[in-house]
Image (cartoon, rainbow, N blue to C red):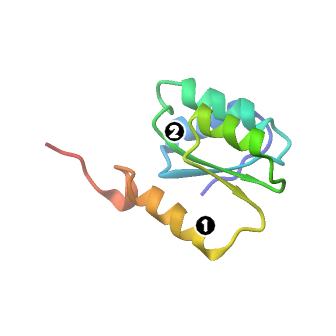
Amino acid sequence: MDTVTDTTSDVVTLARKHQPDVILLDMRQRIDGRDLLQRLKHDPETCDLKVIVLSAVEDQFMRRVCLELGAEDYAVKPFDPAFLHRVARIAASSSNFMGSSTAA
């Protein structure tokens, strides 16, 4: 697992390379989370990746913006155990989860 907070480009590059099942995007990092989410969702190599946004602030406007940009979920920290179940469900729906195959 890689953690990158330096630049949006670093995160997009890692997402292209690793194609993770889920990206947990913390809005309070040094990079602009909304910009990163938009770049991930507009990049042909990362647009189908599942992104869950984490925030320390309950902000209904930002929640709506993130969901409209393509986030799977928006969770406010600290989050309850039900959040971890949602993460697992979203990851399990990914075709890459635990090495699953989509061969026809």
Q: Please state which of residues 62 and 33 is positioned toward the viewer in this rendering.
A: 62
Camera-side mark, 1 or 2: 1
Q: In this view, does 66 lie above or below 95?
A: above
Relative to 103, residue 88 above or below: below
**Label 1 Cα crowd, 10 Å radius (few <14 / some 14-19 / many 20+):** some
Say which amino acid is labelled 2. Answer: Lys
Q: Residue at x 63, y 27 (%)?
A: 39
The percent coordinates of residue 36 (x first, y second) are 69, 33
Q: Residue 59's x, y, as percent? A: 80, 47
Image point (83%, 57%), residue name: 56
Question: Residue at the spot x=47%, y=52% of the render?
Answer: 21
* Pointer 1 residue: 83
Q: Is mark 2 on a helix, strand or loop?
A: helix
Q: In which quarter of the image is residue 100?
A: bottom left
10 Å neighbourhood of mark 2: few (<14), some, or many (≥20)?
few
Please say if 58 is above or below 103. Answer: below
Q: For the view shown, which residue lies furthest in the left direction?
A: 104
Dot label at residue 98? none
**Front residue of 86 and 24:** 86
Q: Which quadrant of the figure contains the C terminus? A: top left
Which three-letter amino acid code belongs to the residue tagged 1?
A: Phe
Q: Mark 2 points at which residue?
A: 17
x and y percentages locating residue 2 in the rendered image:
64, 53
Mark positioned earlier in the residue sequence (1 or 2): 2
Residue reaching furthest front?
60
On-image quarter of the N terminus: bottom right
